[in-house]
């Protein structure tokens, strides 16, 4: 039988509540328990999924959702094909603080902004940063340009963001997530600060064709199920920009207007990050592979 049990908060929760005392001006935090009690608190609260019965939840999600998730983990090599045990890769992915199949830029809000009254200008600026017919590499290119502008001073940085319609707050968030991810990668033994000499000098490294090919291969491996066939339907009028349409396993979808591939017309395959149903089905984060 489930019941609510009174218990002490964790240290993390206590410290978070302490911050509210100085939110708008200097304040005081009074704790109604002694220090030895605080020292005995758990560092973090036990997640709810470990505290409540999961039988009813499993009855609802087991038939399809869990099966789909396990199938994807097996495809990317994170789960053994003949069971539910994690592979060594799966254990490493489980320790990462972000979605296992994507990089920091995809987990956060896009750094590109599109003001309603300056949409055409924003599209031109984004097209100038476009790289490798990929929204992911375009964001990377914008991020690298922003990092370089920061080395030249705040005024240059702000001008770069303004001229390229970039959200500085979103770029800072992406940078924070990236640093956390790199720390986790270092702890897992996948990366070493000494291996990146260009970063230590503060100069962003340009992407070679070989590196772009590897990055596309990595994204394709991680988002393997999200592959669609581009339906090439060029217009008779060369000035008419036709929206890119792709055939996904669940049916046709259009590339979102914010993508650098929104007017892509070629015979090939398209990788996408997610698919959303609004007025019509659209795919976000498109990459031509």
Image (cartoon, rainbow, N blue to C red):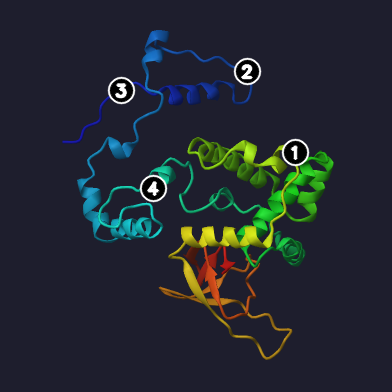
Within 10 Å of disc 2 (Cα), the crowding (few <14, some 14-19, many 20+) is few
CA gap, disc 2 to disc 4?
Answer: 46 Å
- Which residue in the protein does label 1 denote? 201
> Can residue 34 be seen by looking at this rendering?
no
- Which of the two marks, 1 or 2, is nearer to us in this view? 1
Question: Which residue shows up at 67% across the image and 62% down it?
Answer: 209
- Which of the two marks, 2 or 4, is nearer to us in this view? 4
- Which residue in the protein does label 3 denote? 7
Q: Which mark is residue 26?
A: 2
Q: Quadrant of residue 270?
A: bottom right
Question: Which residue shows up at 20% across the image and 35% down it?
Answer: 2
Most foreground residue, 226 or 9 = 226
> Can residue 184 be seen by looking at this rendering?
yes
CA gap, disc 3 to disc 1?
Answer: 50 Å
Tag 4 and tag 3, C-beta contact below 8 Å: no
Q: Is residue 245 left or right of residue 208?
A: left
Kind of element beneath mark 3: loop
CA gap, disc 2 to disc 3?
Answer: 29 Å
Q: In the image, is residue 2 above or below residue 84?
A: above
Kind of element beneath mark 4: helix
CA gap, disc 4 to disc 1?
Answer: 34 Å
- What x and y, as percent, mark residue 26? 62, 18
Q: Earlier in the sequence, mark 4 or mark 1?
A: 4
Most foreground residue, 75 or 231 = 75
- What x and y, as percent, mark residue 282? 52, 69
């Amino acid at each position: 039988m489930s019941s609510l049990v009174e218990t002490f908060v964790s240290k993390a929760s206590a410290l978070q509540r302490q911050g509210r005392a100085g939110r708008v001006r200097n304040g005081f935090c009074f704790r109604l328990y002694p220090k030895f009690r605080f020292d005995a608190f758990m560092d973090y609260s036990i997640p709810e999924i470990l505290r409540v019965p999961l039988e009813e939840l499993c009855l609802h999600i087991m038939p399809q959702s869990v099966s789909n998730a396990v199938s994807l983990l097996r495809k990317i090599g994170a789960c053994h094909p003949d069971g539910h045990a994690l592979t060594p890769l799966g254990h490493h992915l489980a320790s990462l603080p972000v979605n296992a199949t994507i990089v920091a830029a995809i987990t956060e809000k896009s750094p590109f902004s599109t003001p309603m009254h300056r949409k055409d200008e924003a599209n031109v600026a984004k097209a100038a940063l476009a790289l490798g017919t990929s929204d992911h590499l375009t964001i990377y290119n914008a991020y690298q340009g922003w990092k370089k502008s920061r080395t030249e001073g705040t005024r240059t940085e702000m001008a770069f963001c303004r001229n390229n319609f970039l959200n500085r707050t979103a770029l800072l968030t992406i940078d924070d997530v990236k640093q956390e991810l790199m720390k986790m990668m270092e702890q897992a033994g996948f990366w070493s600060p000494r291996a990146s000499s260009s970063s230590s000098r503060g100069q962003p490294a340009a992407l070679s064709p070989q590196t772009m090919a590897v990055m596309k291969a990595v994204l394709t491996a991680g988002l393997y199920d999200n592959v669609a066939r581009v339906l090439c339907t060029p217009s008779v009028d060369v000035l008419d920009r036709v929206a890119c349409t792709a055939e996904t396993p669940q049916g046709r979808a259009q590339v979102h207007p914010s993508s650098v591939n929104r007017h892509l017309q070629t015979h090939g395959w398209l990788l996408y990050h997610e698919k959303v149903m609004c007025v019509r089905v659209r795919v976000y984060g498109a990459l031509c592979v």
